[in-house]
Amino acid sequence: MYKRARQGIGYLPQEASVFRKLSVENNLKAILEMRKISKEEQEEKLESLIAEFGLEKVRHNLGDSLSGGERRRTEIARCLASDPKFILLDEPFAGIDPIAVEDIQEIVAKLKNKNIGILITDHNVQETLSIIDRAYLMFEGRILKAGTADELSQDEM
């Protein structure tokens, strides 16, 4: 994970990856402290991430007490703490409620607007098609269909 981060690649696994016995704030600090930036820059980035992901109310809560959506937002914020140029999201909508799905969709849209490359693997085609530019539908390791969200949603396959 450390090597990936150094190469500008962030990764959000499907399974919970938040540090359960650390607060939200310390989850982010754990990554920020590994970066070669000043303490002041670390603090600025921490506050920026907490605000951007709406984590103010839970910043002192331990990871194991977070809801699915809070946990996912914390994990994405932690992923962004390494300032990646590209992010791999594995099943980003797994284990979260429908309202949190909308939150994550909005976050992904914002990441696209920041020119961060995003690769999503997901079984929830509807949630994913609404936020992507291009998709590849795969089965048993082979690409069955490729195209834009509109092209694939109109396909009768």
Image (tube, helix red, strand yellow):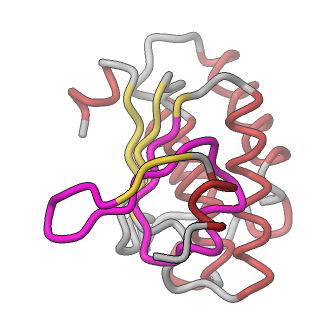
Q: Is residue 59 above or below residue 51?
A: below
Name the residue at 29% across, 63% down.
138
Q: Is residue 111 above or below residue 100?
A: above
Q: What stretch is highlighted in magenta?
A: 118-144
- In this rendered view, identify the residue nearer to me: 155 or 105: 155
The quadrant in which the N terminus is found is top left
Q: Position of residue 142 (x, y in %)?
A: 18, 58
Name the residue at 58% across, 11% down.
38
Classify residue 30 by image quadrant. top left
Name the residue at 39% across, 21% down.
8
- In this rendered view, identify the residue nearer to me: 13 or 38: 13
Q: Position of residue 11 (x, y in %)?
A: 38, 46
Q: Where is residue 72 in the image (x, y as percent from the top left)?
A: 58, 67
- In this rendered view, identify the residue nearer to me: 142 or 70: 142
The quadrant in which the C terminus is found is bottom left
Residue 18 on the magenta segment: no
Name the residue at 65% across, 84% down.
67
Classify residue 49 by image quadrant. top right
Residue 127 on the magenta segment: yes
Q: In this view, does 157 lie above or below 28?
A: below
Q: Is residue 125 left or right of residue 99?
A: left
Q: Is residue 19 above or below residue 85?
A: below
The tally of labels here is: 0
Q: Is residue 127 left or right of residue 15?
A: right
